[in-house]
Image: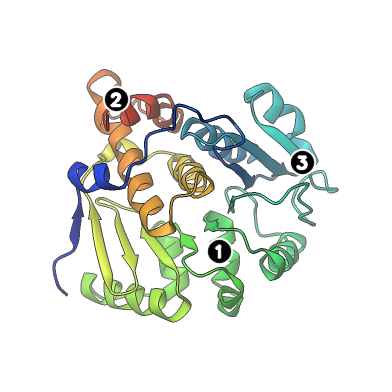
């Protein structure tokens, strides 16, 4: 395999678009985060908050009813739409046509949720990020990927990647299989890990930010929010994915001198997004 392209600050500065001085919330994109189930509403909170904190003008969370109060109390800036079901998602009816959608964190694999995901994929045309349980459901129904928009972003951790592409016996085989998967389904894959790689067809990119502090619960939910936000703001998927992964890692690099590795949690990624963006100026 040829050497991956490095995602450096120099590269990111070419992609990054500072906020227009005449911007208002209506020009900064409206994103939808479809997430959560009973016991996992935190995933919806983290993804929605990181979506807002990455510059999105408006964010609506679509969640089961059990998360309604939790979400409003946790993040008053985020709007909510609820499923008819109390504990998990069964019927995705959005009250708007957003600029981008992130789906999967904490949604579970209930049969009703699987059916809801299929129906959603069948009708959705918005730029898309697929994460967590959405990937686990799709790994058992790979033909559904033919329904997603071209350049949909998939964000698997190693176990989710294995479910999608099958087991591998070496690092080179893992990359070969992931490249073939990306080409076949015309999707962009974020191979979360240390380091994180982005696979876009035959192009492989290696992120240069981040450290072991990111190995913590909810870290991936936050990344989903960041990527969805950037898509909603008008970044092309191939650029959103590089900028999002770079910023996500940079938060840990900036925070660890104060937090240490052990005490850094997913909320700290969100808290340090402002510093990460300022680092690009």
User: Which residue bears the numbered disc 3?
Assistant: 81
Q: Residues within 10 Å of mark 1 (few under 14, many from 20)?
A: many
Q: Answer whether residue 166 is visible to the viewer in this image.
A: no
Q: In the shown orientation, is residue 35 left or right of residue 92?
A: left
Q: For residue 17, what is the image quadrant?
A: top left
User: Which residue bears the numbered disc 1?
Assistant: 136
Q: Secondary structure at mark 2?
A: helix
Residue visible at 33% across and 75% down?
179
Q: In the shown orientation, is residue 280 left or right of residue 239?
A: left
Residue visible at 60% across and 50% down?
99
Q: Residues within 10 Å of mark 2 (few under 14, many from 20)?
A: some
Q: In the shown orientation, is residue 73 left or right of residue 184?
A: right
User: Which residue bears the numbered disc 2?
Assistant: 255
Mark closer to the chain start, 1 or 2: 1
Q: For residue 199, what is the image quadrant?
A: bottom left
Furthest residue toward front: 22
């Amino acid at each position: 395999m040829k050497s991956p392209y490095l995602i450096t600050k120099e590269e990111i500065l070419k992609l990054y678009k500072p906020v227009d001085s005449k911007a208002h919330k209506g020009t900064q994109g409206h994103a939808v985060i479809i997430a959560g189930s009973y016991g996992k509403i935190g995933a919806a909170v983290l993804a929605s908050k990181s979506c807002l904190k990455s510059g999105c003008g408006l964010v609506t969370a679509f969640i089961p009813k059990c998360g309604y109060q939790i979400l409003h109390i946790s993040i008053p800036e985020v709007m909510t739409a609820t499923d008819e079901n109390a504990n998990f998602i069964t019927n995705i009816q959005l009250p708007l046509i957003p600029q981008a959608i992130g789906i999967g964190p904490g949604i579970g694999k209930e049969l009703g949720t699987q059916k809801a995901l299929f129906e959603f994929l069948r009708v959705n045309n918005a730029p898309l990020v697929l994460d967590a349980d959405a990937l686990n459901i799709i790994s058992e129904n790979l033909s559904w990927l033919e329904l997603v928009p071209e350049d949909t972003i998939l964000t698997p951790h190693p176990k989710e990647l294995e479910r999608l592409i099958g087991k591998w016996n070496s690092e080179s085989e893992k990359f070969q299989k992931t490249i073939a998967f990306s080409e076949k389904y015309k999707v962009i894959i974020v191979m979360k890990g240390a380091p994180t790689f982005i696979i876009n067809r035959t192009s492989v990119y290696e992120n240069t930010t981040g450290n072991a502090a990111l190995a913590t619960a909810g870290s991936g939910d936050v990344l989903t929010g960041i990527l969805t936000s950037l898509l909603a703001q008008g970044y092309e998927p191939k650029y959103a994915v590089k900028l999002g992964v770079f910023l996500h890692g940079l938060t840990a690099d900036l925070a660890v001198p104060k937090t240490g590795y052990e005490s850094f949690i997913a909320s700290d990624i969100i808290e340090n997004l402002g510093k990460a963006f300022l680092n690009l100026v």
